[in-house]
Image: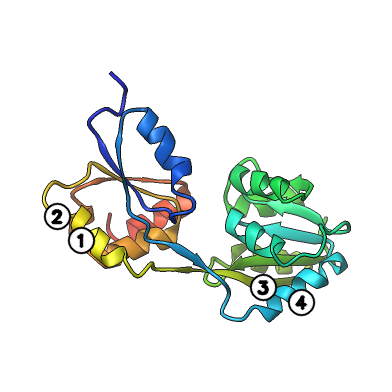
Amino acid sequence: MRPLEGLRIVVTRSREQSEALATPLRELGAEVILLPVIAIAPPAEIEPLRRAALSCDHYDWIVFTSANAVSAFAAELLHVPQKPRIATVGAATRECAKKHGFTVSLTPEEYVAESLIEAFGTGSIFDCRILIPSAAVTRDVISQELRNRGAQVDVIEAYRNVLPPEAALQASTVFRGRYPDWVTFASSSAASNLAGLVGTEALQRVKIATIGPITSNTVRQHGL
């Protein structure tokens, strides 16, 4: 018997990214329910991102905190920048950067913002120009701490996390009748979006798995 046989597991990642988690869960025997509560949309204004892409060789570092940021930024490039060094938070972001032709110089062992700051080392970024293509709403830990250490930091909106229009109907169907056994969250936005759609009482009836400590904190803030 496969170890996850008989378990119904909800994957809440965007439709484009869901299979990276759904496929191995199925291979382990789970019944996977795709419930995308996140969709990736372009930035509200595209011009700042395009200008940043055109001038990126003026930076010393580019910091990517998600694969979505890599893809959105790479789409606006005329060529892979040669001057700036590349830092990524997490293995998936690093691999995405490599696929787009970037040479990654720095990835911390722990995949959280605080670990990236420590990986830079004390004093190594003073007066450096650093570009951070980012989601429209994100934690400000990296940019603020880099500024505290003397860096000149520009944060550019590269994409937005939005709620798919069909998510409400799909969520009400999933949480009707027999509830799933597990719900998985790969971001704080997904956790908050689903809590808003079905309510915390419904989510208290399932087990929750998250991708990391930041998303876990968001889940706990909802009382789960």
User: Which label is found at residue 176?
Assistant: 2
Percent coordinates x, y for residue 33 in the rendering:
30, 46
Of residue 119 and residue 1, the one placed in the foreground of this image is 1
Could you say where residue 34 lies in the image, as x and y percent from the top left?
34, 49
Type of residue at label 3?
Ile
Secondary element type, mark 4: helix
Report the residue at 79% width, 47% height from top. Answer: 103
Callout 1–callout 4 Cβ contact below 8 Å: no
As measured in the structure, the alpha-carbon distance from the residue carrying label 4 to the one carrying label 3 is 10 Å
**Residue 73 visible from this viewpoint:** yes
Q: Earlier in the sequence, mark 1 or mark 3?
A: 3
View extreme (top): residue: 1
Q: Which mark is residue 172?
A: 1
Asked whether residue 152 appears in the rendered view, the answer is no
Q: Which residue is mark 4?
A: 51
| 10 to the left or right of 75 | left
Q: Which residue is mark 3?
A: 156
